[in-house]
Amino acid sequence: MKMKLFSSSYRQGFFFSIFHILNLGVKPFWIEVSYFMILSLLGLLALTISKPRTLPSFRPQNLDVFFTSVSAATVSSMSTVEMEVFSNAQLVFITMLMFLGGEAFTSFLRLQLMKSKLSMEKTVLQNKIETSNSIISIDSHDSSNSPRNSIHHLELGHEQEDSNLEHAIINSMEDSEAIVKLKSLRFLSYVVFGYILGVVVLGSSLVSIYVSFIPSAKQVLKEKGLNLHTFSLFTTVSTFANCGFVPTNENMMVFRKNSGLLLILIPQVLLGNTLYAPCLRLTIWFLWKITKRGEFEYIMKNSKRVGYSHIFPNLETMALATTVLGFISIQFVVFCSLEWNSEATAGLSSYEKLVGSLFEVVNTRHTGESVFDLSTLTPAILVLFAVMMYLSPYTSFLPIDSNEERLETTERMNRRKGSSLVEYVSFSHLSYLVIFTILICITERDKMKNDPLNFNVLNIVFEVISAYGTVGMSMGYSCARQLKPDVHCKDAAYGFAGKWSNMGKFILIIVMFFGRLKQYCKRGGKGWKVL
């Protein structure tokens, strides 16, 4: 019996070691880096195999195709080619990249890993407890049958019973806690998936219905040769995932007078990013009140213990929602004050200006869809937009440290001891943006000298911050601003980065990856404070 138990324990230990290497030994940072890199490469392969709409007159370069794939996978929506170049099949592939790379879906995948990890740890722990109890039982049986130890066994019997009972109670409590947490994670994963699916299905249906019944919007799709269902799904997924791609060259500027469509998209922008956590908590609270399930109550009352990075306590959730609405209100007032009678809003009615301004300021945080030409806006508005793009989605006037607060005290201390050197040597996010900007200014120095109105520092900084914030807003490029007019210059409806050199584009690709994974290095720069 002992040999059998030893063999079983050895197999369990070996299996646990393999699981520890695969699931616990690999840091989440490298898992996500691999995920987005593989997703980008698969997108490059799919977009390369499928033929663009503009063949044989024009085919994008491989670097531009990879740039688009990375931009879609990291939901950055930076563009170096016009969107109408892509065929219907390629638009479907880009939709898949945006959906799989969106924060809501990747957080759902993290939930699955957390659930499988907890389930495996619970199973291994139970097996170890059963094995340990069996060995103790065998040893106790052998000791009780020995004449020499019978008296000693009788003397210590009561003490062993109390100790075993105490361990049993502790193990039972821990096991009960693990079971409740595991069930809660399962219910939470169902809620998150249903949330994502519900928003996408409802949003794409509303967009499709609107375009079908509004002649002006329907005419746009007809002139551009876009499929109604592809456009609806593409736009909804892009908006909800906070990517910002639109399958038209002009982004949403071609729909600037379709206020109904803009009002349909505004909630999707908020539901997928800045208000995702408050809306998800509200959904769970609603389900708790209806179903009276204990799992929902556990999630509501133990949000930090659950470990899902988008569930916060009630006070922090309210502070986050208040901050988001406050930022929108400030931007809306400033934008309307400075741009009400400007060139950007010319030709719109008062109602269209109000809706268009609200749509623009809501998109500045992370989505990047635009109904106005950013190059015509006042510098004060551009600086305000740059600040909004730099902020993380869960910026709040009440400090929220979701990663650190979800760690136990011992684990947090071990983490600080092991990574203190890296934290102090590494730079802050703002320092990295300065470095990226300097590198791009070096690669584009000739163009900055010959074309200073387009290639100025503000435009480059705006582009870098937009890529870092995975927003996608861009100043664009205008041949009319050239000091030395080029007869071969042709205005193109893509981002400013489309006019950069290949090295500049490659640096911006790194910025997009860095921006998508910036939550893993937010504690850097401690040793670089200026006193």
Image (tube, rainbow, N blue to C red):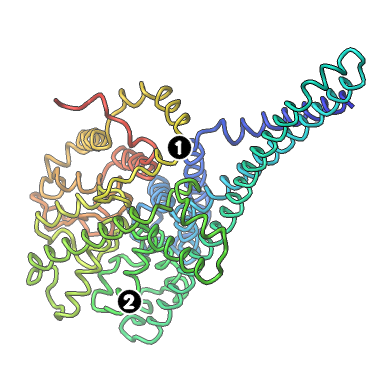
Amino acid residing under circle 1? Leu
Residue that appears at 20% across and 27% down: 529
Residue 98 drawn at (x, y percent): 44, 57
The residue that appears at 68% across and 36% down in the rendered structure is 125
Query: In what quadrant of the picture does the N terminus appear?
Result: top right
Q: Which residue is tagged 1?
A: 407
Which residue does the image show at 45% across and 60% down from the upper left? 52
Q: Which residue is mark 2?
A: 261
Left or right side of 166 for 220: left
Q: Could you tell me residue 183's position as x and y percent?
A: 61, 54
Q: Mark 2 belongs to which amino acid?
A: Leu
Residue 55 visible within the image: no
**Residue 85 x/y as whole percent:** 38, 62
Check whether the beta carbons of the residues at disc 2 and disc 1 lie within 8 A of each other.
Answer: no
Residue in the foreground of this view, choosing between 155 and 219: 155
Horizontal and vertical percent position of residue 187: 57, 59
